[in-house]
Structures are given as C-alpha cells and as structure tokens.
Image (spheres, rainbow, N blue to C red):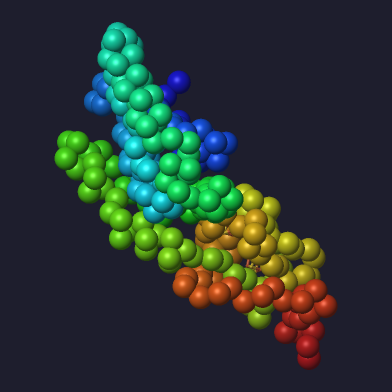
Amino acid sequence: MCSGRVDLAFVLRAFSNGMDGVFIGGCRLNECNYSTHGNYHALNMALLCRKIMEHIGLNPERLRIEFMSSGEGILFAELMSEFGSTVKELGPLGKGEGIDQNELKSKLAEITKLVPYIKVVKNEKLASRLESPEEYDKLFTRDEIEKLFSEVISYYIDPDKCQACGICAGKCPAEAIAGGKNLIHIIDQEKCIKCGTCFEACPPRFGAVTKISGEPVPPPIPEEKRTVVRKHKER
Ligand code: SF4
Ligand code: SF4
C-alpha cells in the first residue's frame, strides 16, 4: 500500500532469493496523503541499502527507487524499461560483480540478521526528510557504513550480576535469552538480533546486561555454574 512499508529486510530478502534487481515505486515526494510521509522513509532506506550493497561488493544500481503518481503510466513504463535494461547489462546478481555465490549468500544473511540493529543505530537518519536529490548521496557515507559494521555491538549478560529475574528473557523479541528459575540467564549470540531491549530492560539495581563493541563476546557460563548464588544464602 505504502512505499514506507518496504523494509530494508524485504530488499535484502529479494536479493537473497536471487533477484537481480529491485525496483521500489512510491508516490511523489511531498504529495503523501498522510502526515507520515512514508515515501521519505522508503527513500532513506533505499539510500542506506545502496551503500550497504556497495559495502558487500554489489552494484548499487541493482536497487532503484522512483516516485510518481498513478496517472504517470508512461513515466512508469519508461523507468521500468530503462531499469530492466540496466539490470540485464549488470548480469546475474553476484556473477556480474565477480562475487562467489556462497560468499554472497552468507554476506546477505549476515546483513539481514543485523537489520534491527541497523534500524536502531540509523533511526534518526532513516526518519529524516531530505530537501533535494543533491543531498541523497551525502546521507550515508562509505566510512559511516564501514564503521557501522566494524563496531557492531553485542550484548552479554554478566554472570556475576544476573539475578535471574527473567525480565530480559520475557522481553527479548528473538527468544535469544535462555533463562529459568534461579538460573543465570545467557544470550544465544546466533539468535540475538542486537535490538538492545535486554540492555534497557535489566533493572538498574542489577545492571547485568553489558554492551560489547570491537571485542569478542565471552563464552556463556557453563551449565553447571548457572545457579544463582544469592548473598543471604551464602552466609
Ligand atoms: S539484544 Fe537482547 S533483547 Fe535484543 S535480541 Fe539480543 S538478547 Fe534479545
Ligand atoms: S533482566 Fe538482568 S538480572 Fe534479570 S535475568 Fe535478565 S540479565 Fe539477569
């Protein structure tokens, strides 16, 4: 219904499924019927996605976004025909760029897993309203994207601080936290989508969830050591 609904994950899914090109059509900018102006969100998402594509070695021309009204059938036909020719010239996804298919698959899977994290970190820019096409290329820079992926944050539960209250596990949207009564909670890094909910949810008096950036995440505490030792019981 609205181009603003086109999530970054949808575009990545199309490429993961082998599509050679993705075209997003939205209503004309500043002509949205709603105060949300979702087409600006779509534009920003596409600009971000194009930079991410460059980062993983894909030609950003494979993703195109255009804005037009429902009365502009001729313009739509022309754009689609032009885009079709561009994609044909680029060749099959990955092959045209000389990327190994398995490597491309794993890169796309890795980025897709990070979509919630990317959306949280780039939230402000994704919601911005650009004034002119000249600003498009400056919204996300190459360095910024490099940094985005080199400084990915991981979340870790400090076994010495966790009191097994279960709040984080109840709020985790990815079911990535293994818990249990009186058991120190642990995060499954494979399932974690880095949304940061557990970091916000852990009561400050415990402060057990920590953010880790640029360092390896410590291994989870062994099963036999997961029982919480409460101070009053130690005495
Ligand atoms: S950051 Fe925390 S809440 Fe979010 S997915 Fe990872 S473990 Fe779950
Ligand atoms: S919210 Fe904090 S204290 Fe409670 S189980 Fe999670 S990490 Fe442990």
Task: Say which quadrant the C terminus sits in.
Answer: bottom right
Q: Nearer the viewer, residue 62 or 34?
A: 62
Q: Residue 234 occupies which quadrant of the picture?
A: bottom right
**Ligand 2 visible in quadrant:** bottom right
- Name the quadrant of the N terminus: top left
Q: Position of residue 218 (x, y in %)?
A: 62, 76
The answer to whether residue 114 is left or right of residue 79 is right
Camera-side residue of 229 and 17: 17
- The residue lying toward the viewer, choosing from 86 and 164, is 86
Residue 199 x %, y %: 54, 63
Residue at the bottom extreme, as displayed:
235
- Place of residue 169 in the rendered image (x, y in percent of width and height, measured from the top left): 68, 58
Residue drawn at (31%, 26%) of the image: 66
* Residue 190 visible in the picture: yes
Q: Is residue 9 above or below residue 85?
A: below
Q: Please, is residue 68 above or below residue 230 in the view?
A: above
Q: Is 13 in front, or is 200?
A: 13
Residue depicted at x 31% and y 47%: 125
Residue sitting at 43 percent across and 35 percent down?
A: 91
120 versus 157 height, above or below: above
Q: Is residue 35 visible?
A: no
Q: Is 211 situated above or below 167?
A: below
Residue for point 51% across, 71% down: 212
Q: State the residue lying farthest toward the right.
A: 224
| Number of marks present in the image shown | 0
- In percent of width and height, residue 80 lies at 36, 20
Which corner quadrant of the image does residue 208 belong to?
bottom right
